[in-house]
Amino acid sequence: MKAVIQRVSQSSVTISNKIVAQIQQGLLVLVGIEDTDNQQDINWLTSKIANLRIFADENEVMNLSLKDIDGEMIVVSQFTLHALTKKGNRPSYIKASKPEIAIPLYESFIKQMEIEVGKKVQTGQFGADMKVGLVNYGPVTIIIDTKNKE
C-alpha cells in the first residue's frame, strides 16, 4: 500500500461539477492499493499517518500531528501510485489491485483512519473521474510505502 500525504491549508474533491469533499487545515491522502496489501498494512499505515508530526507548534517547529491540531482529512484512492515506468513511456498499472480487491481494502482503510483520528474522514469516490484541488501548505509532501517500513 502506498500513500502520498500532503499537508494542506485547503483541499477539495469535485465529481461531475459537484464538490463531494472539502476541508481546511489538514491532510490530503492519496492511497494506492495492490493485491498483497492486507489489514496489517492498513493498521500500520493509518497509525503512521494520523501520528505524523508535520504541523507547526507554537515555536514553528513541525512537532504536532493531525490529531494534535484537530485537523481534517480527505482520502482519495489513486491506482496510479503503483505505476511502473521502467519500460517505454506508457506506464503499466499491473501492480494496482482490481476493484474487487481494492474497494474492500480502501473502505477498511477509511474506517481505520476514522478510528485513528477520532472523527469522520472525507473521501473521493472510488473509480470516479475526480478533480482534486489543494493548497499544499509548506509545501509538505510525504510518501509512505508499507512494503518499505524503514
Image (cartoon, helix red, strand yellow):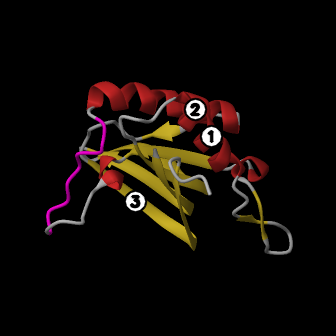
Q: Residue type at mark 2: give it.
A: Gln
Which callout, 2 or 3, points at the residue further toward the start of the chain?
2
Q: Which residues are magenta?
A: 89-97
Q: Residues within 10 Å of mark 3 (few under 14, many from 20)?
A: few
Magenta span: predominant SS is: loop
Q: Which of the pair 116/57 is nearer the observer?
A: 116
Pointers 2 and 3 in contact (CB under 8 A)?
Answer: no
- The part of the image, by quadrant, that contains residue 92 is bottom left
- The part of the image, by quadrant, that contains residue 34 is top left
Distance between the alpha carbons at the discs numbered 2 and 3:
30 Å
Residue 99 location (% of width, % of height):
28, 30
Which callout, 3 or 1, points at the residue further toward the start of the chain?
1
Callout 1: SS: helix
- For the C terminus, give its image quadrant: bottom right
The residue that disc 1 covers is: 44
The residue that disc 2 covers is: 40
The residue that disc 3 covers is: 133
Pointers 3 and 1 in contact (CB under 8 A)?
Answer: no
Callout 2: SS: helix
Distance between the alpha carbons at the discs numbered 3 and 1:
27 Å
Q: Is residue 81 left or right of residue 28?
A: left
Residue 45 location (% of width, % of height):
59, 43
Q: Is residue 64 left or right of residue 113?
A: right
- Residue visible at 54% across and 37% down? 41
Q: Residue type at mark 3: give it.
A: Gly
In this orientation, does residue 140 appear? Answer: yes
- Residue visible at 48% across and 44% down? 75
